Image (tube, rainbow, N blue to C red):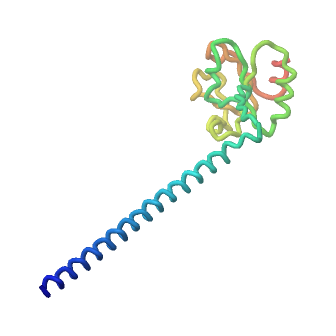
Amino acid sequence: MAKSKSNRKRNDRKRIEEVVTTENDHMDKFFIVAAVILFLLCFYILTVYITNKNNDTSDNKENVVEINNEYILLGRSLSMGKGDYYVLFFHINDSNVYDEIVNNYSGDLPVYKVDMSIAFNKKYITDGESNKNPSKVTEFKINGPTLIKVSNKKVVEYIEGEDAIRTSLN
């Protein structure tokens, strides 16, 4: 009987330890789940805050994108349309002079401008003789301010120099 009482006491202690251990395990799991949920909630709130900050509508400013077909890259010189048009090649340092010439132009044909100081256009600049009859863009060699008239994607007129360009567009 003494053995059975001591066995019972041992079994009771084991059961109490198991119950206490089980309760501690449940509390640990609860705190881990609560911490994960709290972390995700904070992450969500932070994300919403940042997103709304970027989409602030209090400015009421519209981002308007304007496409400026007045200036083109030299590579588009022969592909601006099937009809007739002018293409004016010049360096941006002379833009005031050529903007004035184009603004005073009263003809019906559109005039597109090519800024030869742009990196994409620089490979067509030459110190030597200009190619006055290019059949494709890769054959262009521009030496100074130049005006070309394009008709059906072909160069039909080639004018060099400020005075000649001014005369042609008046």
Q: Nearer the viewer, residue 64 or 26?
A: 26
Q: Nearer the viewer, residue 102 or 65?
A: 65
Locate residue 120, reporting x and y percent: 62, 38
For image coordinates 36% across by 69% down, the residue present is 23
Quadrant holding the N terminus: bottom left
Outermost residue, bottom side: 2
Q: Nearer the viewer, residue 64 or 28?
A: 28
State which quadrant residue 138 falls in. top right
Q: How many marks?
A: 0
State which quadrant residue 127 falls in. top right
Locate residue 113, reporting x and y percent: 73, 28
**Image side of residue 91 versus residue 105, left or right:** left
- On screen, residue 53 above or below 149: below
**Image side of residue 69 versus residue 48, left or right:** right
**Image side of residue 65 versus residue 18, left or right:** right
State which quadrant residue 114 falls in. top right
Outermost residue, front side: 1
Locate residue 48, reporting x and y percent: 60, 48
Q: Nearer the viewer, residue 53 or 12?
A: 12
For image coordinates 62% across by 16% down, the residue present is 154
Locate residue 119, reporting x and y percent: 64, 41
**Image side of residue 140 versus residue 86, left or right:** left
Quadrant holding the C terminus: top right
